[in-house]
């Protein structure tokens, strides 16, 4: 039976038994949706099969669980490290407990009978010793010829016959046997950046591509090492394309091969996965991003969804593996994740446009609490799915990122140099309830028309073309905020003689500091002095030498009227400031902290600028040599977050579309669909917000909300999808205003025209 005939037969059987088909829901007009599986499968499930599961896999129970959790697609272990079907390839390792059973085939058939989409899961980058002994040249080796290993398994090489000949045959075999809608792979990209393979295939291919031998060590300044980085990225894309040609030829044009990807740009870089190029060649991203860190919080999941949608498109789907077991700094595969932790991770993902995919390791558990977590959340998702997909963000603040900056500027210290500034600024925006969009540096031109403000958080490595895109944004009247060493390096991470954007920043004399031995990640006893100084008129003791008050403070310094200094924690070097630019903060160098008797400023005032404001070509520009974005990520001081938010509000000239007041830490994400606005509010105020896992949820509210809708949308009614409230709305001066009384975990507000 051909694949199309098989699918039609399954659909007919499902319809006869009243089972909703994942191949298309019955619409209001009585027609069946014709969209391919990767555009309409909103809820997923995965039970990761262990070696001993074939003897205890209760398929009937899991089928009932599929129905209870309202899923539309399943991911089922098929082949790779372990084959869960009778493969014709003798070296395709089968668990002893499997015997002659076709467990994968049974599960795929059951899922199809239930009208579910099936993705066959592979795990391709490792194999058992018998495979290695039979084909040692198919596996990665170090400079001494020793094979790379992961535990008892051997790591296969992307440039050898394992990926080019063997795996395509396995994919064809799986498709011919069970007709899955597609194939996915957990570990598809081979060795990471920390390891260089010197197998004969790598040696030959690299010399053919570059004319050079493989680099012998990691040296970011070595042109050959840089070539190896680029070559390694290109090879992963070749594998992506090869696998898709294979699956589409065997299973039809919609039978996609989709490798799983990380939610971390640094993680993608370490694995040579070019997110922009992958998104340009796929219809769906399967996100293997399973937990938060204490420093990133739940809000990182919403941010990840927005960042990937910015590359992939907002009409496409991003299912994310959401484990029901304890995953994080402490990982216990067979124990239930605390329900509040699992729930908040999933809800934060919804706010960023991510689709749920519950995930268990093993088909049998003694800790049964994990079976209760997904059902209520996925049932709510099913009831409200129309508001959770096919929508576009409403935001006019863009924060720019670049994977190349992570690679060639961040190099082996990307967390400090790249991730921390990004994390600090995004968390300041969340804390201030300012909607924003992640913008890839190569997409500035295509996104610029929708933005009022661009933020460059230590975006140090920029090409001349990328610098030109930033300039054109400002020339068209856009505002710019930049921090740290932004534009001080070329795209390869080589230092420039000065900032490429020096004239916009209003400074000259920038000197790269990355190569120094100075420890920049720690917190030093340094401060920033505000201008003008106001302590002479503020309640407190007087020494008689307070500076005269010469002017009022700039709006960027709002909220700091009772202080003339702010804590800093970093270091600064001198810069020359243009005459037209304004310096609002200057640097106070470090002085002793201990013993307390010595804690007085040795040099209370310098001319070293920490914050410069400039206006050019109609745009407002703020440059922060003081890396308060990084400091906020490290120290979480409210002064730093408040100042960053003030800069954005000033730069936006009052054009921000959302205002939310009320106590509590919340993440606000605003979207639009034809004729409606959708506001997600995720409560981040929980016991353990900054220390995973969360044990309990703490309700917050009330919140006063003001929304300035786009001209095409004039809301008349409001409904809340969690609290089930409905009411009318009236606009005043272009704004609609309403109250959200209380939020336990999240609220979704729909404003209809």
Image (spheres, helix red, strand yellow):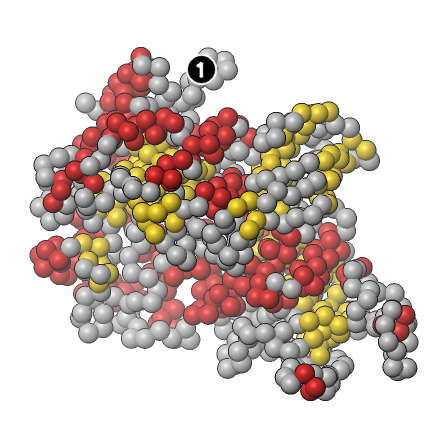
Q: Which quarter shows the C terminus?
A: top right
Q: Mark 1, residues whose alpha carbon is within 10 Å: few (<14), some, or many (≥20)?
A: few
* Residue found at x 18% / y 44%: 52
Q: Quadrant of residue 184?
A: top left
Q: Quadrant of residue 25?
A: top left
- The front one of 287 and 402 is 287
* Residue found at x 14% / y 45%: 95
- Above or below residue 571? Residue 633 is above
Q: Is residue 16 visible?
A: yes
Q: Quadrant of residue 454?
A: bottom right
Secondary structure of the residue carrying tag 1 is loop
* Residue found at x 41% / y 54%: 328
Name the spot of residue 373 as percent of width and height, x first: 42, 37
Q: Which quarter shows the N terminus?
A: top left
Q: Is residue 441 visible?
A: no
Name the spot of residue 348 as percent of width and height, x first: 52, 43
- Above or below residue 495? Residue 85 is above
Q: Is residue 539 left or right of residue 178?
A: right
Q: Is residue 194 left or right of residue 645?
A: left
- The front one of 235 and 702 is 702
Q: Residue tagged by mark 1? A: 31
- The front one of 315 and 740 is 740
- Above or below residue 420? Residue 682 is above
């Amino acid at each position: 039976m051909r694949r199309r005939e098989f699918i039609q037969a399954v659909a007919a059987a499902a319809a006869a038994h009243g089972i909703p088909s994942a191949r298309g829901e019955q619409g209001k007009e009585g027609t069946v949706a014709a969209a391919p599986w990767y555009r309409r499968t909103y809820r997923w499930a995965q039970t990761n099969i262990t070696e001993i599961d074939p003897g205890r896999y209760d398929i009937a129970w899991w089928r009932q669980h599929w129905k209870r959790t309202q899923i539309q697609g399943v991911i089922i272990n098929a082949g790779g490290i372990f084959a869960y079907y009778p493969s014709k390839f003798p070296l395709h390792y089968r668990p002893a407990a499997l015997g002659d059973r076709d467990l994968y085939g049974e599960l795929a058939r059951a899922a199809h009978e239930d009208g579910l989409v099936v993705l066959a899961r592979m795990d391709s980058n490792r194999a058992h010793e018998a495979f290695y002994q039979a084909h040692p040249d198919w596996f990665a080796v170090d400079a001494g010829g020793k094979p790379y290993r992961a535990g008892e398994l051997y790591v296969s090489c992307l440039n050898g016959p394992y990926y080019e000949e063997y795996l395509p045959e396995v994919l064809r075999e799986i498709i011919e046997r069970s007709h899955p809608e597609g194939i996915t792979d957990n570990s598809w990209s081979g060795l990471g950046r920390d390891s260089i393979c010197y197998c004969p295939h790598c040696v030959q291919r690299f010399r053919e591509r570059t004319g050079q031998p493989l680099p012998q060590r990691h040296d970011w300044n070595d042109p050959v090492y840089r070539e190896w980085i680029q070559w390694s990225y290109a090879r992963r894309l070749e594998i992506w394309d090869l696998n898709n040609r294979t699956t589409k030829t065997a299973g039809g044009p919609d039978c996609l091969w989709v490798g799983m990807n990380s939610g971390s740009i640094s993680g993608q870089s370490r694995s040579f996965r070019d997110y922009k190029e992958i998104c340009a060649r796929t219809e769906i991203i399967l996100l293997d991003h399973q937990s938060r860190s204490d420093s990133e919080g739940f809000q990182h999941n919403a941010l990840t969804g927005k960042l990937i949608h910015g590359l992939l498109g907002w009409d496409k789907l991003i299912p994310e593996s959401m484990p029901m077991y304890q995953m994080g700094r402490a990982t216990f595969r067979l124990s239930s994740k605390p329900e509040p932790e699992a729930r908040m991770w999933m809800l934060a993902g919804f706010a960023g446009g991510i689709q749920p995919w519950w995930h268990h390791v093993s088909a049998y558990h003694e800790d049964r609490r994990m079976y209760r977590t997904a059902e209520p959340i996925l049932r709510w998702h099913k009831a409200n799915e129309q508001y959770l997909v096919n929508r576009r963000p409403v935001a006019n603040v863009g924060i720019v990122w670049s994977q190349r900056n992570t690679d060639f500027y961040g190099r082996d210290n990307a967390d400090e140099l790249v991730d921390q500034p990004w994390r600090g600024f995004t968390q300041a925006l969340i804390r201030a309830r300012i909607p924003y969009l992640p913008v890839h540096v190569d997409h500035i031109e295509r996104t610029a028309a929708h933005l009022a403000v661009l933020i460059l958080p230590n975006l140090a490595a920029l090409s001349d073309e990328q610098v030109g895109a930033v300039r054109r944004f400002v020339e068209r009247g856009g505002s710019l905020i930049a921090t740290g060493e932004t534009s001080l390096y070329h795209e390869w991470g080589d230092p420039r003689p000065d900032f490429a954007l020096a004239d916009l920043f209003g400074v000259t004399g920038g000197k790269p500091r990355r190569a120094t031995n100075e420890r920049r990640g720690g917190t030093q006893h340094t401060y920033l002095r505000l201008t003008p100084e106001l302590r002479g008129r503020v309640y407190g003791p007087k020494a008689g030498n307070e500076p005269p008050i010469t002017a009022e403070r700039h709006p960027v310094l709002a909220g700091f009227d009772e202080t003339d200094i702010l804590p800093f924690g970093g270091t600064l070097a001198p810069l020359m400031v243009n005459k037209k630019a304004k310096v609002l903060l200057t640097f106070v160098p470090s002085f002793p902290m201990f013993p307390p008797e010595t804690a007085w400023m040795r040099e209370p005032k310098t001319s070293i600028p920490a914050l410069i404001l400039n206006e050019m070509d109609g745009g407002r520009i703020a440059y922060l040599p003081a890396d308060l974005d990084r400091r906020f990520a490290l120290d979480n001081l409210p002064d730093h977050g408040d100042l960053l938010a003030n800069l954005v509000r000033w730069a936006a000239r009052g054009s921000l579309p959302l205002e939310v007041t009320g106590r509590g830490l919340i993440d606000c994400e605003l979207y639009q669909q034809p004729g409606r606005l959708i506001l997600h509010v995720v409560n981040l105020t929980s016991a353990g917000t900054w220390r995973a896992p969360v044990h309990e949820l703490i309700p917050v509210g009330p919140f006063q909300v003001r929304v300035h809708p786009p001209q095409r949308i004039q809301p008349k009614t409001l409904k809340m999808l969690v609290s089930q409230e409905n009411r009318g709305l009236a606009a005043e001066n272009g704004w609609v205003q309403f109250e959200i009384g209380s939020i336990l975990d999240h609220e979704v507000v729909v404003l209809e025209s």
